[in-house]
Each structure stands twice: as C-alpha cells, then as structure tokens.
Amino acid sequence: MIITIYDAASAEEQVVILLMRFKNTQVYDDPNNFISNWSNSSSHCSWNGITCSRAGHVTSLNLTNAGLVGKLHLPTLTTLTTLQHILLHGNYFTKGNNFSVSSYCNLQSLDFSKNNFSGMFPFLDLVPCHNLSYLNLSQNLITGTDITEKTGFGASLLQLDLSRNQISETTLLSYTIRNCQNLIFANFSDNRISGQLNETETETLVSCKKLTTFDISYNLLYGEIPHGFVGDSVKLLDLSYNNFSGVFSRFDFSHCRSLVSLSLSHNALSGTEFPSSLINCQVLETLDLSYNELNSLVVLDISENNLSGELPLTFGNCSSLESLNLTKNHLFGDFLSSVVSKLSSLRYLYVPFNNITGIVPLSLANCTQLQVLDLSSNAFTGSIPSVFCFRNAANSPSALEKILLAGNYLSGEIPAELGSCKNLRTIDFSFNNLNGSIPLQIWSLPNLSDMIIWANNLTGEIPEGICGHGRGNLENLILNNNFISGSIPQSIGNCTNMIWLSLTNNHITGEIPASVGNLNQLAILQLGQNLLTGRIPPELGKCRSLVWLDLSSNKLIGTIPSELSNQSGLTSSVSFAGRQFALLRNMHETSCSSAEQIVEFQGIRAERLEGYLIVQHSCPSIRIYTGSTPNTFSKNGSMIYLDLSNNSLSGSIPQNIGSLTYLQVLNLGQNELTGNIPDSFGDLKMIGLLYLSHNKLQGSIPSSLGRLSFLTALDVSNNNLTGSIPYEGQFPSFPSSSYENNSGLCGIPLSPCATQNHSPDFMTDPEKKETSETGLFMLSVWFYISMVLGFIIAFWGVVLSLLVKDSWRHNYFRLLNNIADWVYVRAALLKARMR
C-alpha cells in the first residue's frame, strides 16, 4: 500500500492514521498501557515511543520492553518515509501475513529481538531498505531463510544479530560470510547450525575487511576450521561450544594482526603443540582452549607477550602438560597455587620477569616431576621453601635439577633441606636478601654445576673439600658481593670443570691457592676487593682458557709472574660464549678504576642491576652494558681483561705481557712497580684502557705506544717518568691528569719540553723554520687524529664490539677505514696550507 501525501496538513493526518492503524490492528494486547496515550486528542510527537524531528516528522518508533502482544505487518510502518528506526525489542510480536516493506523504506535500524517471530525469515522483503545498517533478530524462533545472492540484505548492513534462534542450516551463515564487505558485527551464536564451514577462499573472514566481531558459538558445527579462516580486521572471534576437530597446531593465524580475543573452548581440538603462526597475533589478550581434547598438550610457550592477569583455571585440566613457559609477561595473582600446582606431569616451569608477589607457593611441591623451576625477577618475599626436595608418595627422590629464584626479595637462610635434591645441578638465588652461610649439604650435592648466589648478605666460609670424592662437576661458582670470609680452599683445584669463579667484594683472606692452575676450563677469575695476601701464583699461566683476571684491591705482594702470558695464542672462548653478562665500565675516572667488573646477569632485571651497582660503587662515571658473549676466538686468543691494581706488587712489568694480543683492559695502577714501561706494549693492538698510575715507573713513554689506535683511556700519573710525551697516537688528546706528578715529563698536554723551543746551533735559519713548520704540521695532524680516535672510537666500540656481537665488530672496523680517509685528507690540506 502506497500513500501519496499532497500537503503538510494531510501528511500529518496520514501519519496519525498509520500509527493508529498499527495500534488498533496489529497490537492485540497492551498489558502495561505503554501506548495508551496514543489518541487523536494529542500530538503524535508526544506519544510514548515516538520521536520526531524539529520539523515534526516521525523518525523513531521505540517500543522496547513494552510487553506488547500482536502480529506485525511491516507495510503500515515503512510507508512513513521519515521513519529511520523501529525498535521492538522485548515484545511478543509474531510475523503477519504481509512482511514486505514500502519502496520508500528509509529504515536504518530494525530491532525485532526477543519477540515470537518463527519459521523462515523473509529477508527478501527487506531489500528495498537501502540504508539499513542495523538488523537484530536475536532471541526469536527463526529456523532459517530462503535467502539467495539476489534477495539478501544490501551492502549497507553493518551489524547483524541472529543469535539465540533455532537456525539449523549453514545457508544464512555462508551467505553472510560471502557478503560481508561492510559488515562490522555478526552474531550467530546459540542456534542449531549444523555442518562444516566451507573451505573456499570466499567463505573465510579474510575477505571481510571491516569485520571486528564474529560469534558462532553454541552451535553444532563440526570438522576442521578452514585454512585462513581468521581475517586481519577481526578483534573478537568466538568459535566455542561446537564440535570442531582437527589438530590445533594446523590452525592458520597468518591473518590475525588485530585479534584480541579468541575462544575455541568446548570443542574437540587435539594436538600437543601451538601453531607457529600464532606469533602473528601481536595484540592477542585472551586465548581460551579449555575443554578440548588437548589433554595430550605437552608444551605451552606463550613467553614474551604482553599478557596480564592470571592463568585461567581451565589450564589446570592440561594433565599431560610437561613444559609451561610464561616468561616476560605481566602476570600476577595466585595462579601458581590454583592452576600450576595441579599440573601433575609438569617438568619445566618458566615464569621469570612477571609481577607475581607473595611467598613462593608451597603447593608447587605437588608437581613431583618438576625438573626446572624458574621464578626469577618477580616480587616474591618470605623465605625459600624447604619442601621441594621431600620425597613424594612413591618415596622416590626429587626430580628437581634447576631452581632459579634470582631477582626477588627473599630473605632468611638457605634451607639445608635442598641438599636432599640429589639431582640438583643449578642454584641461582642472586639479588635477594639472604643471610647466613651456605649449608654444607648444598656444597656436597653430587651433581651441582652452578652455584650462583651473588648480591646477598651471605656469611660463612667456603669449605675445604669441595669438588672432592668424585664431585668435580662445579662449573660456575659466583658468590661476589656478599660477606663471605675465610680462605679459598686448596680443593678448589679439584673443580676441573670450573668456567667462572667470582668471589669479588667479600672478606676472603689467605693466599690464592696454586691449585687454581689446574682449572684448564677457567675463563673468568674474579677475586678483587678482598683481603688476599701473598704472591700471585705463577700456576695461573696454566689456565689456558682464562680471558678475564681480576685480582684488584687486595694485599698481594711480589712480582707479576711472567707466566700469566703463557696462554697467549692458545686461548679459546668457546666455554664462555653465549653467557648473559653485564659489563660495569668506569668512564675514564681513575678514582673509580676498581669499579671495572663483569657480573653474571641471567634472570635479573636491567634496571634493578643498574641501581644496585651504582649504589655499590658510588661512581658517577659508571656505565653498564648488558648482552651475551659470542665465540670471539676459537683457539688463538688471549686474555682480554687483566686487573692487578691496588695491591703491593713490586718489580718490573714483564715484557711478554705485550704478547696478549686480544688484551683490551690492563690495570696495574696503585702498586709499587719499578722499571720502564715495556716497549712491547706497542703490540697490544686491541688495548682500550691502560692504567699504570701510582707506581714507581721510570724512563720515557715508549713511542711504540703510538701504534695503539684503539686506546681511549690512559693513566700514567704519579710515577717517575721522564722525557717527552709522544706526538703519535692519541697521547696529545688525553687530559693532563693522565700524566701529572711525573716531574720529568713534558710536552702536550703538559708544559713544552726545553728542547722543543731551541733548534741546534748548527742549523741555518731556513732549516730551523722548516723544522718548526714540520713540527707544527705533525702536531696539528696528530691533534686531529687524537681527537677523532679519542672521542669517536669509544671504549664500547672495542670491548663490546669484540665481546658482544660480530656485526658490531664489522661495522666498527668499517668506521675506522672511513676515519682514516678523513684524517688523510685533513693532513694533506694542512700540508698544502703550510707550503
């Protein structure tokens, strides 16, 4: 029925007639008297549920939750050309005989949800509504549709909700996926849709460029989820409560860059692994896989994401899970007790770098097969539990091999009960507030390879007899920054697998045992800042793998053994490669030279490490670099760090130290060394820091040191050196403090030497002038070279480029070539000007 309106008066009358016809012929019952004020005695714009424009045109009919009972005939309402919204949610309308719409339909929103529409829904009758963007038919009794490619809804539709009906066929679902060009929201949940999703490319969500929410949960769909089903625009995808099957690892996540929430719970998915393509879901926050057939799931790795909150309780049903990796997220709460402790098959648990607080859960002892427990860098407090090593119900010994609790706030003593974990290989309790001594039961563990408990408040002594009785497996003993006393036991020489021995900054006394020379695998030996006495054992020269030796700030006497250089050209860094470390570097401040050190860095937050080390040393010039060590040299290397400073060493410096071709830091300052600076130091091609201050060295600074192009920090102050400071290399660029208190030294940057102001008498005036110009030219050239090499070639370019990463090293040497070209051009220009 089409009504033609001729004037404003008749138009208003016709609107009233149509609305009253709707009330009188289509509404059978109005139990709440919602439309009782609809009468000719009042303006229709004042009626309940009617919204008019300023011009008095009806734009919206909103009878939501009115409780009306009736039979709807759409032509009556859609003849109103100004009507944009019909909202009938929460009534009891059924479908009338005529559900077609007027050709003048201007509807934008149509909400028939929660009514009594049943049977096949005639979408064909909605085709004339070209502006329809919202269609809600949820909570009805619709069973299907006769929709076709020519009779479906138009491209204007943005939101479609058909949830909670009785739709059984996939026809409407497939049509919607094929025609979703502008669709944003589609909900088919809680129906009876049975069948398989089509495998064709046109029936995946990839073609739905604007779709953000797609919900087909609570249906009877089965089979495998089509390859590439997820689209890049989809944020929420709910496929739960169906019968989807197949191996979950085959699920294709290649188009999931917007996916925030995915629910696949209550299906029949199987498998033991996660899809590798899941890495593409960079913003995924929720993944629900509960109640599938993933009981055979063995490995779950969701590390290094931005996940927050707790692990869902449903993960407690993964009875076959053996490895759980939650590293580097933002997890918190008590899920370790409520979920993880129920995983009876769990062997490997990695939860470092999260935000978990409270005590370490005792219930984790229920995971009797646990081999690795890593809770590093959280915020745990309280004491270390003693229950992890109790025998289980079968009276079998604990399977625990690694317990990593570094970077927390644990206090109290280390429990002696850990000595019952006979399979224990690695202990890392670094960066806590532990006190007391290390129990003898732990020192006696037969398979212990790593004891890493630095930066605590430990006391006591290292017992004699370690690595004895066949227990020679200790590889890393890192106890620096504690209050350990006593002497280093002779039995340390039995630890023939030792790679890293760090006892720096303790209260250790006595002599360095000669048995340390038995440690052929030893790469790092740090004994600085203790109370050690006696001589440096020459047996250290037998440590063919030694790359880092720090004996600084002790009370050592005697000469520097020439045997320390015996390993030059024989050293391999293989055993040291790949380890996480932090390099604490003093930026040219000699008063803090003892702050140079390398520390173990596994499982500790960088910001906490930085705060601790700067407070410890109180040196404003400290810089901290972190990384892992590459295999810098395979067989022909040498020591790279040698610090014997702040002792009472005497005698001359051995000439053969110059054979340590990879040496980058040499600190012999604050001793009582005599003799000359060895000319062989010119062969230290990689040297970056050279500290020889506060000794009794004599003679001149060897000109061979001018070949040290990587040298960025030099200190020869407070000696008895004489002669001219070399022009070569970077010597003129170093501050005067590097040379002060040597009464016989002269030249830039100190006062000029007397011979520099007077030419020999036998020279003619032209010769004097040429000599003076040549000297000026050389000074200018070396000034530029020194400035460039002194400030552009920073120390990190040496130590870190060679110690940390190969690519940095290659770029570094490429930079040197460019600098050489620049210096050559600059020198040529200066020479030309002088001529």
Image (cartoon, helix red, strand yellow):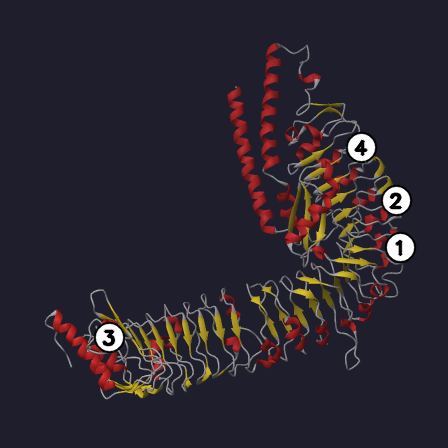
Considering the numbered disc 2 on the image, is that residue within a helix, a strand or a loop? Answer: strand
* Mark 2, residue position: 533
* Mark 3, residue position: 129
Q: Nearer the viewer, mark 3 or mark 4?
A: 3
- Residue type of the residue flagged with mark 1: Gln
Q: Residue at x 78, y 69 (%)?
A: 386
Q: Nearer the viewer, mark 3 or mark 2?
A: 3
* Mark 1, residue position: 490
- Residue type of the residue flagged with mark 4: Asn
Q: Mark 2 or mark 1, which is nearer the start of the sequence? A: 1
Q: Is the residue 594 above or below the residue 25 in the image? A: above
Left or right for 441, reference 829: right
User: Can I make out residue 150 in this image?
Assistant: no
Which residue sits furthest front? Answer: 41
Q: Mark 4 or mark 2, which is nearer the start of the sequence? A: 2
Residue 598 lies, in percent from the top left, at 71, 49
Left or right for 642, reference 255: right
Q: Is the residue 194 above or below the residue 706 in the image? A: below
Give how far apart the Cα atoms at labels 3 and 2 are. 96 Å
